[in-house]
Image (cartoon, rainbow, N blue to C red):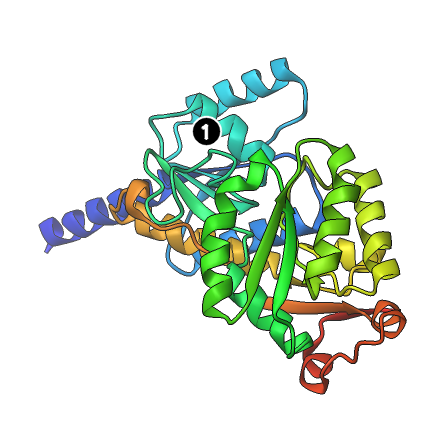
């Protein structure tokens, strides 16, 4: 009887120690609402699977010495895996740590930015949940907004060049022709837009830092308004600025997806073979003032589900 009690006590203590040893690191670079919602999604998902987790949180600044110091602190903590939130934090951690699994979240274009080798087979020690809404879903919404649309245009640069060929294939499958114009510098944008306006029924966009600076973004939106072209932005911020519509995501859901991937990795799977997740909850945003200006009626079924309407 006494021996049995001792065995149970030892097992109980071992279980407590094991629980205490579930150390995970969360690395991010700001305290924006989107970041905090992502982290809440991560934590809520992991807490449903594990009884006790010790989190080590590191907020990275833009100071290189501070980043190096915090990464060293992270290495000393020796977590089982690292959860990074946002492109900046992910890039900094991935460049410095190769011997720990890294699960990223709230990252835009992880393949284009070189964070993963491909969305299907990330490779290395990293995978996660991106903010990229697949083009076929975007094209589906574009056709709902404008059911007679046939040709859509897009601007791209070297930064997003690898997104264009698969997007063209998906556009064809949706009954659309995607006409793409490459931009070398901002000076190319007016001429490229003039060409697209002559041959397309609307404009699509990809998140490209070389194209969408604050000044050029304003020009692109004003050009679309003057030419009467429906412009699909890549974020709700563009809709607020005058784009006709955009699709957006729930950051907490992005965090939940990252949490689910973390559970897979903690269960023994390699990040290299876990496909990058895409948003599971998609929200529709549109600009009512822009719709009136270019004489487009947003379908009632989309109006009914719109997350936000800008007026």
Residue that appears at 11% across and 53% down = 4
Instruction: Provide residue 310's location: percent of width, then percent of height.
Output: 84, 67
Residue 47, by quadrant, is: bottom left
Q: Is residue 126 above or below residue 177?
A: above
> Which quadrant of the rendered structure holds the N terminus?
bottom left
According to the picture, the residue beneath numbered tag 1 turns out to be 94
Badge 1 density bin: few <14, some 14–19, many ≥20, Cα 10 Å:
many
Q: Would you say 45 lies left or right of 50 here?
A: right
Q: Is residue 180 visible?
A: yes
Q: Would you say 255 lies left or right of 32 here?
A: left
Q: Would you say 163 lies left or right of 121 here?
A: right
Q: Is residue 280 visible?
A: no
Instruction: Provide residue 32's location: percent of width, then percent of height.
Output: 71, 45
Instruction: Provide residue 42's location: percent of width, then percent of height.
Output: 50, 52
Instruction: Provide residue 51's location: percent of width, then percent of height.
Output: 39, 54
Q: Nearer the viewer, residue 236 or 219?
A: 219
Residue that appears at 32% across and 49% down = 274
Q: Is residue 8 above or below residue 282?
A: above
In the orientation shown, which residue stands out farthest toward the top?
65
Q: Secondary structure at mark 1?
A: helix
Residue that appears at 33% across and 33% down = 124
> Which quadrant of the rendered structure holds the C terminus?
bottom right
Residue that appears at 16% across and 47% down = 6
């Amino acid at each position: 009887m006494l021996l049995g009690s001792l065995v149970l006590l030892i097992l109980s203590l071992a279980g407590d120690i094991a629980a205490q040893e579930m150390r995970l690191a969360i690395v991010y670079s700001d305290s924006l609402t989107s970041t905090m919602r992502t982290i809440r999604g991560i934590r809520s998902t992991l807490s449903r699977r594990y009884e006790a987790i010790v989190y080590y949180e590191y907020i990275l600044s833009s100071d290189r010495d501070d980043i190096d110091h915090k990464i060293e602190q992270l290495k000393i903590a020796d977590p089982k895996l690292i959860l990074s939130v946002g492109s900046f934090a992910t890039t900094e951690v991935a460049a410095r740590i190769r011997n720990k699994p890294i699960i990223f979240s709230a990252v835009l274009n992880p393949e284009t930015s070189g964070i993963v080798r491909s969305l299907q087979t990330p490779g290395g020690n990293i995978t996660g949940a991106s903010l990229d809404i697949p083009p076929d879903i975007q094209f589906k919404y574009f056709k709902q907004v404008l059911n007679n649309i046939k040709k859509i245009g897009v601007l791209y640069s070297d930064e997003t060049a690898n997104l264009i060929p698969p997007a063209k294939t998906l556009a064809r499958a949706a009954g659309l022709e995607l006409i793409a114009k490459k931009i070398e510098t901002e000076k190319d944008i007016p001429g490229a837009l003039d060409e697209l306006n002559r041959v397309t029924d609307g404009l699509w966009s990809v998140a490209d830092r070389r194209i969408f600076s604050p000044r050029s973004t304003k020009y692109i939106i004003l050009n679309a308004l003057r030419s009467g072209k429906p412009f699909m932005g890549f974020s709700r911020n563009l809709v607020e600025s005058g784009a006709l519509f955009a699709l957006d995501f729930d950051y907490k859901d992005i965090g939940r997806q990252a949490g689910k991937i973390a559970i897979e990795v903690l269960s023994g799977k390699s990040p290299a073979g876990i496909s990058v997740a895409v948003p599971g909850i998609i929200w529709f945003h549109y600009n009512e003032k822009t719709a009136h200006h270019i004489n487009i009626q947003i379908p009632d079924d989309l109006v009914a589900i719109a997350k936000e309407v800008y007026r």
